[in-house]
Every structure is written in C-alpha cells, then in structure tokens.
C-alpha cells in the first residue's frame, strides 16, 4: 500500500456516479467542469489562488492499483472496477496561475474530459484548491499588514500534520519569508527557520533553580551569536540582559512570545539600545493575526512569527470553491434550484486594468465567444493551459513565479481592496455570457 | 523518498534545540512533557480527545533515513546528524483514551523520555492531537444535536486532502455513521457512503433539455431502488415525483441539498406520503452545522449530511493544545512570564462522578502524589499506558472503543454541558498539586 496514491482521497459518490454513468452514453460525453467560488469568505476583498501546482503533481498519483481496487470492488460492479484499473486522466485542464487573485465567479480551473474521467477528480481538486487557497488568502492579508517586515510561518502544530506542509507552501506563495516546517523545505524548497522554545530554557533548571544564562550560552555555542534568543521564559527584562551578557551586542535577535507585544517591544528595544545591541532584532510571536500585525506597525518590531491564525485561514479555513458541470457535448448546463444557481457554459476570464495598473473589473465570458470589449482598459487573460491530454504542460509556473504574481496582484488592487475591514470584493465580476 | 516518513513533519527549531542540547548534559536528562489545553475553544463546554491512535501509528515512521538526513544536515552539525540517524523514541507515553472528554488543564498526554528524545516529538504530537480533537469536539456537538438521527460526514472537499481522512476518523469517533471519504474506509475501516451529485443529473441533458428521469433511472439501474436520489437539481416537487415514478415507492431516500431545508423536508415528506412512499427517507445536506441540525429537530428529516462545518471544527479548527516541559530530573519546571503560565510537575487526573454517573469535576494531581479524596464521589483514572520503552502497549483501544467511550462520556455530562450555547466548561478542573 503506497500512501502517496491519491485515488482514494475521493468521495464514495464519485465512484457510484461513474458506475451508473458507465452503463449509459453519458459516461463518454465530452464535459466541462469548472471550479469557482460563489463568494469570498468572511467579507474578504480578494482571494488568492493556491494549490494548482500540488494538484497537478497529485494527478500523476491518481491511479487504481490493487490496493485501491480492493476497497472499491466492495461496492462497485466488475465493469466499473475494470474501467478504474485502466484509469488515467486524459483530458485538458486550464486555470488561473498560482498567486493570481480571484473574485466571485472567477473560473479558477476548467477541466475538459469525458464525464466519467472528469467527475472522478472532483474531491481531490476541491480539497487541494480549497485548502491551499484559504491559507494563501489569509496569508496575503498578513503580508499586506506587515508591510516590508518579514513574517515567518510557524503554525504546523495547529493543523493536521500534512496540511501543515501545504500551508507552509501556500504561505510562501503569499510572501512569507520562511517556515518552521521541515517537510515543506524538503518537498517544496520553502526556506525553513527556527531556534529554540521555552522548553530549552526550562531544561537547564538545576537544584538551585532556573539557569537562563546556561541555556542561552548553550544555544549560542551551537547556533552562533546570529541566533534568536527567546527572552520571555522568566522575566523579560532579566532575559534581555542575560541574552546580551551571554551573546554580546552582536546577538542576532531576541524573541518575545507572550504579553502585550507592542509595549514589550518598545521596552526591549530601549533596553537593547541602552546595552549597545542596536542591531539586535526583535521577533514577536504569540496569537498574531493580520489585525494584531497591523496594530504593531508603529512599534519597533523587526520580524513577525505567525501560527494558528495562518494555518486556520484566519477565520476562513476553507475557500468554499465548487466543481460544477457547466457543459455537456457543447451544451451549457446549470442547476436551477434555489440558492445555488450557477451559470452554464465553459468560461474564460480577463481582468481589466487602467493604464496605471489598477484593476477595475473581472470579466467572465464564454470560452468560445469573443474577448470582451476593453473600453480603453488593458485586458489580461487569466487562464493558462496546465494539462493537455492528461500530461502537465511544461514548464509550469514555479513557486517563485507564484510569489511574484501575487506581489504584483496586490499592487494592482484599488486602495480600499488592501484594507483589512470586511466588505465587498475589491473589484466587481462582470459576466458577458450572451 | 517515502512519503509515509513523519520525521520532517517537525519544526526546524526542535532540531536546533536538540543540536544545542546534545553538547550539554541537558540532552540526556529525564524529562516529562505534558499535552494540555489552557482553555476550551470558542466557549465550548467540553472537548473530545482524538488522534492518539494515529499518533502512536506515526511514531513508528518517525525515523531519519538518508532522505531526511539530507535535509537536516544542511543546518546541523555532524554529531547531531549521527544522533538523529539512530533516533528511536525509547520513552513512555501515557494519555487519555480517544473518545474521552477533556477540560482545561486535563493532562491529555504525558511523554517521559530524555530531553532530546521527547522535545523532537512536539510538533507531530500537537499537529495530530490539535487537529483530530478539534474535529471530534465539533462533531460530538452535532451528534448531540441530531439525537437519534444518523449523520454522514461529507466534508472532504472542504479541507486538505489528507486532513480529510483524519477528519472522517475523528467524526466516526464522535458518533457519525459514515463518511464519504474512501481513504478513511481503507485506512481506518470507517464505513463509507454516497450516491450521486447534481453533475450526474445534469450530465443527462440532451438537445431537448434536461432529463432528470433518465438520470434517476440510470442511478437506480446501477445502485438499486435502495439508493438515494438527489431531487433538487431542477424543481424539487417535480424531482420527487420523477424519483418515485422511476424507482417506485420502495425508493430508499431522497436528498435535498439547498433551500430552506425545514420547509422543504415537510413538503417533501407530505408529497412522498401522498405518493405512497411512506418508507422513503429524507436526507438533508447543505451548510449544516450543529445549530442548523438542532433547528431541524421538529422536521421530518431522517439523515443529515455535514461537510464544511465538520472538517473546519465549526468555528474552532484547532484545539489549541500545547506540549510543555513540566519536569526535569524529578524537579517541577514552569514558565513564569505573563499570560502563559503553566503548572510544573508531572500530573495525573481523575474524574469525579455522582453515583448517578453525572460528572462533577476533573481533578488534576501530582503523578507521584496520593490519589485525591473522593468525598463520596466515584473517581475514575483518566490516563492509560500507551507506549512503554518506545513500543505501543497492546492492545490499544480501537475506534469502536473510542466511540463507546465518547457516547458514555456525553451521557455523563451535567445537562447544561450538552447545550449548544457558549459558556463555561461543563465541570470545573480542580488542581491538587501540594
């Protein structure tokens, strides 16, 4: 049993649908499925696409081998089981680049294949895009709030152990500087960072009580004076003094992980400066989210560490994207019942911007129709080919590309779109579907 | 590279701490680390322990092979790298059973080993327990709200693809009946279920328009009349009529996935009964959480499907547990700075109940001290041995054991503890540490 197989990261009903479809012509009809979000979560002004690169990697592991067949043959007929044994996605996928902004209705991913081939991918596609986009969308707000100050992602312990790896990747796309997560370093090349926790300092407690200086000395011996010393295990003022006494004024940084971070940062900065450690940086962490980061703008903070709020999407842990059948054999189809209406037909999208670069609207139009009018605005196509005939289109954008794309995207937002307050999407979505 | 290796699902700083510690006696001092939650999230009345079984499984994969070493040797000294090559956890772990209730301060897991051996596990321990316990805690509230009606977990698409598997497992512990997730079926034996989505019905659209009856007929042909037909793709009343016309009055169930579920359930029940399909069940789904489930108590609903709210912990996506060093060579240690104080010393816990079975308080006491007084109450020990000398203590509780434990735990709560409203923990935690 190979745990990297992804075929069973799938809802039971995708397979019963395939079983029912295979007895009918519908299984082999050419279909278009579209991924989009009906709305942005939680009053957000924009969303950030992330996960597409992971999805394309995982597609190659979406295979029904003997171990997977053993599970599904318990509830599927033999013909369906045989079809699954041979399953290879052979269709086409187009989509928004990772790091691209998105808005309600943006056609973030378009899957073209037979009904049976495409419906089978629904769960995996949505799991990856919904998770990674939720994290990247929250992280981008933190990056905006932090301005030019770097943020380190350290939330692995607050989310599922594998989601942590994807979170670190999504956060890196959003512009965070580094992660605590080593698997994200191995798998995706995200820079990793970290020094020590309170346990390290507490571990030096002896019969005569705590010995913070011994702990600091041991850390500096192993990691050098450029390290970051955690100064709030006991008394912070004493901790800062101990840190400089042990490491000298060349100490890289001190970290404060509790208390009123703004007040403490000011006190610690004054103390460090008075001790001559004017270059020693201040790292703050402890339940920071985008609002707390913004509130520390005027304080002498050099680096932020964020955890819980990042890996939980800061109040919006899922992006709420859906995977909808929009076209069958060239005919638009759409659900018609209340509350969840959707727009039929395969779509493409362009983003309209003024010559200044500021974006004005997202225009969603029929994929087989003419590109919409520009009205003097600059239009940029938003989808790129990602998979053709089941194979990735090389070269796919890299993580660095995604970081740059998002950085440029944030600059293109109207000023109110960068605010942290809840409200409408930063630009409206206009549909040109007739 | 084996993706089932878990050694790098770890924060960078756990390894730099080991590196710094190994040059000192501290690395080999006997330490006790304790997992607990300072508070319950979001005004909850109780938490549910989940993930312990997964953690013990993953411990066996926590090894530094060549691929893992290649990552860590970039920032660690050769002696530390050699130590990691030989790393096997050889200590002891005690903890609360899966499915056990917990309260603020409950010593959910106690790890006894050398400093270096134990500190290395922090991130993995917390990732697993924080995620799985958050899901189980939310799921238990949904099960309470649903009363005797079954709930199916169908949230895989709204969370990370691997977190989805753990969520299905945690939800099953909490008492949900089944999951949509096939990997959870393979890996943990959770029953899986599912029938069809709107895409299936839409796929039968022809040149003459939609053909819901053809879709229903195809589904019944493949899955039998016991299946569940999704009746809200177009008009629900027409959908119910089509469903019974195609499947007959022996149809297993209809599913409603949108709209005002209470009103619709009543209308559909009346229609089904009028058509003679008195045994056909009604499944409702679509953005249900514990409050929506409770609000449907008086409606003719037979089965609930829950997704987003379950896999995101219904507002509390992480349990907020911490992993704290509490004892070094037999000496209690504790952080003393503001806001995050903790209580030193290894602890055990008993839960006190009246003879009726209703619980009264959680008593946390020194692991090496006397068991607290009972005052006429019944006391139950909460920790069991899980790992001895690095090896799992067989037999560990099964998933069924965990389900039964939680069901019994919910019955033991004072009545106000089962309410959905926010408030204080259902019982207080009393510390007996002198």
Image (tube, coloured by chain):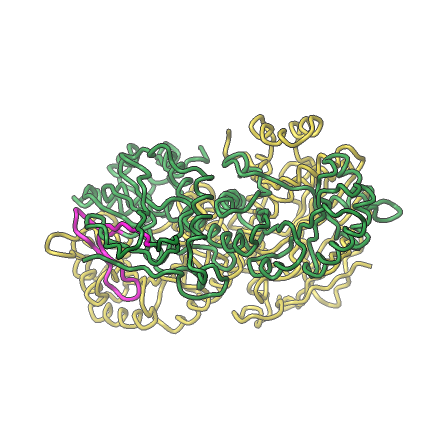
Chain colours: A green, B yellow
Q: Give how far across and how far down residue A239 sits, in percent.
A: 79, 50
- In the figure, residue B381 lies in which quadrant? bottom right
Tell me if A107 is positioned left or right of A242 in this view: left
Q: Quadrant of the N terminus of chain A?
A: top left
Tell me if A265 is positioned left or right of B370 in this view: left
- Residue B53 in the image: above or below residue A271: above
Residue at 57% across, 72% down: B416
Q: Which residue is situated farthest in the right direction here?
A: A208
Q: Give how far across and how far down residue A60 sits, in percent.
A: 37, 34
- Residue B43 in the image: above or below residue B327: below
Q: Nearer the viewer, residue A101 or A20?
A: A101
A351 is within the stretch colored magenta: yes
Residue at 21% across, 65% down: B235
Residue A48 showing in the rendered view: yes
B182 is within the stretch colored magenta: no
- In the figure, residue B72 lies in which quadrant? top right
Q: Nearer the viewer, residue B360 or A240?
A: A240
Residue B332 showing in the rendered view: no
The part of the chain drawn in magenta is A325-352
Q: Quadrant of the C terminus of chain A?
A: bottom left
Residue at 57% across, 40% down: B9
- Residue B328 in the image: above or below residue B45: above
Tell me if A173 is positioned left or right of A115 in this view: right
Q: Give how far across and how far down residue B224 sits, in percent.
A: 24, 51
């Amino acid at each position: 049993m190979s745990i990297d197989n992804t075929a069973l990261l799938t809802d039971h009903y995708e397979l019963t649908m395939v079983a029912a479809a295979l007895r009918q012509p519908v299984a082999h009809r050419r279909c278009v499925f579209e991924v989009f979000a009906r709305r942005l979560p939680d009053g957000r002004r924009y969303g950030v696409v992330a996960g597409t690169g992971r999805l394309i990697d995982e597609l190659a592991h979406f295979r029904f081998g003997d171990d997977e067949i053993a599970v599904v043959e318990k509830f599927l007929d033999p013909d369906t089981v045989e079809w699954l044994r041979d399953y290879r996605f052979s269709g086409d996928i187009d989509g928004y680049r990772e790091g691209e902004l998105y808005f309600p209705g943006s056609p973030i991913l378009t899957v073209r294949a037979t009904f049976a081939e495409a419906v089978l991918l629904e769960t995996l596609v949505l799991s990856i895009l919904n998770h990674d986009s939720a994290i990247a969308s929250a992280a981008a707000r933190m990056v905006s709030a932090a301005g030019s100050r770097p943020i380190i992602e350290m939330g692995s312990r607050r989310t599922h152990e594998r989601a942590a790896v994807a979170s670190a990747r999504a956060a890196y796309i959003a512009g965070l500087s580094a992660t605590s997560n080593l698997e994200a370093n191995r798998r995706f090349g995200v820079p990793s960072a970290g020094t020590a926790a309170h346990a390290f300092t507490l571990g030096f407690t002896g019969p005569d009580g705590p010995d913070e200086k011994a702990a600091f000395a041991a850390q500096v011996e192993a990691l050098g004076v450029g390290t970051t010393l955690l100064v709030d295990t006991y008394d912070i003022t004493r901790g800062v003094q101990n840190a400089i006494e042990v490491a000298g004024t060349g100490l890289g940084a001190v970290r404060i992980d509790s208390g009123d971070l703004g007040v403490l940062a000011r006190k610690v900065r004054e103390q460090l400066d008075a001790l001559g450690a004017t270059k020693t940086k201040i790292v703050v962490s402890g339940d920071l989210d985008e609002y707390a980061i913004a509130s520390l703008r005027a304080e002498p903070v050099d680096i932020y560490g964020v955890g819980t709020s990042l890996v939980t999407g800061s109040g919006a842990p899922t992006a709420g994207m859906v995977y909808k059948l929009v076209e069958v054999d060239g005919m638009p189809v759409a659900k018609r019942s209340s509350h969840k209406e959707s727009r039929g037909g395969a779509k493409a999208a362009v983003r309209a911007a003024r010559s200044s670069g500021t974006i004005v609207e997202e225009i969603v139009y029929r994929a087989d129709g003419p590109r919409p009018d520009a009205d003097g605005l600059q239009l940029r196509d938003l989808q790129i080919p990602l998979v053709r005939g089941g194979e990735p289109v090389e070269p796919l954008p890299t993580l660095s590309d995604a970081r740059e794309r998002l950085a440029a995207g944030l600059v293109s937002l109207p000023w109110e779109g960068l605010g942290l307050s809840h409200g409408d999407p930063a630009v409206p979505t206009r549909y040109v579907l007739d």
